[in-house]
Amino acid sequence: MNKRTAIAKLKVTGLHVAISLVILLGFLYFMLTQWYRTPYFFADQGWSGVRIMIFVDLFIGPVITAIVYLPTKTRKALVFDFTTIAIIQLIALVWGGWLVYNERALAYVYYDSAFRPVITRELNKQNVSPKSLKAFSPERPPLIYRLPVKSREDGNIQIGLIRKGIMPASQYRFFRPLKEHLDKIFSFTLDIKTIANRNTVLRAELDKYLQETGNDLEKLYFLPLSGRDKWIILIFNKQGDRVGHLYSPFKLTYKTNKETVE
């Protein structure tokens, strides 16, 4: 390969990377503003689909371009090569987007001492429209309370739904507005002082949050969210409004207040 060909390949590959990056950043912006609000992206599989798109669009595609491009090729051959590469990248973008869209949490339901994700397929099995979740909370995604089982009838209903592949936290018939049950939920608030003192990273993050917001630690409630990738801590005021979050370096449960962190 002569120097002239190498420079031409480098220019075309650089242009390919730039175009792919612009498209990918545009998609990421849409995803982070519409599908995955802070802080849920890294906690709940937002990163999984994006990794596929980054790998194909910013690595595989440009590498193929660098290999197949030759300035001596005919226009027809170049059009065919670039069209094929564009189709491969489009498939990766659509596949990654489909994965992110279908696996995103439509809501987080407080059940068994933590918020847990509800995804599309679990609602589809119950013939429930995602739009109906907005009735429980103005938050995006909605934060919802799940009634505990209090009778044999409720227990039988829960078991029947589990057999259909619908886990307890996703069982729509038991959903209620979060703010109507704050006393019950806040009784399970984490002892954030004790937990933070066990981990310097969390301690630093908590101190930073308090300094930046000026909120009074004694007037806040800390509830865990069990993401499919990571655990986070949602912070609420006494009115039940979410006023912040902390990323947890370990698994959290209500038992964390009294026992060793898992």
Image (cartoon, rainbow, N blue to C red):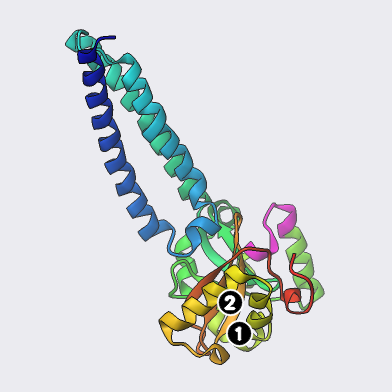
Q: Which mark is residue 181?
A: 1
Amino acid on which disc 2 is placed:
Arg
Mark-to-mark CA distance, 1 and 2: 8 Å
Give me the residue at 50% from left, 61% from top.
40
Which of the two marks, 1 or 2, is nearer to us in this view? 1
Quadrant for the N terminus, please: top left
Where is residue 63 drawn, in percent x and y? 37, 24
Query: Is any part of residue 242 visible from this angle?
Result: no
Task: Magenta stretch: give its range.
Answer: 161-170
Q: Are marks 1 and 2 in contact (CB under 8 Å)?
A: yes
Q: Report which residue position mark 2 lands on.
A: 176
Query: Is any part of residue 40 visible from this angle?
Result: yes
Determine if the magenta segment contains residue 29.
no
Pointer 1: residues within 10 angstroms few (<14), some, or many (20+)?
Answer: some
Q: Is residue 125 above or below residue 177?
A: above
Identify the secondary structure beneath mark 2: strand
Give me the residue at 53% from left, 60% from top.
128
Sequence-first tag of 1 and 2 = 2
Give me the residue at 31% from left, 27% from top.
86
Left or right position of 165 against 26: right
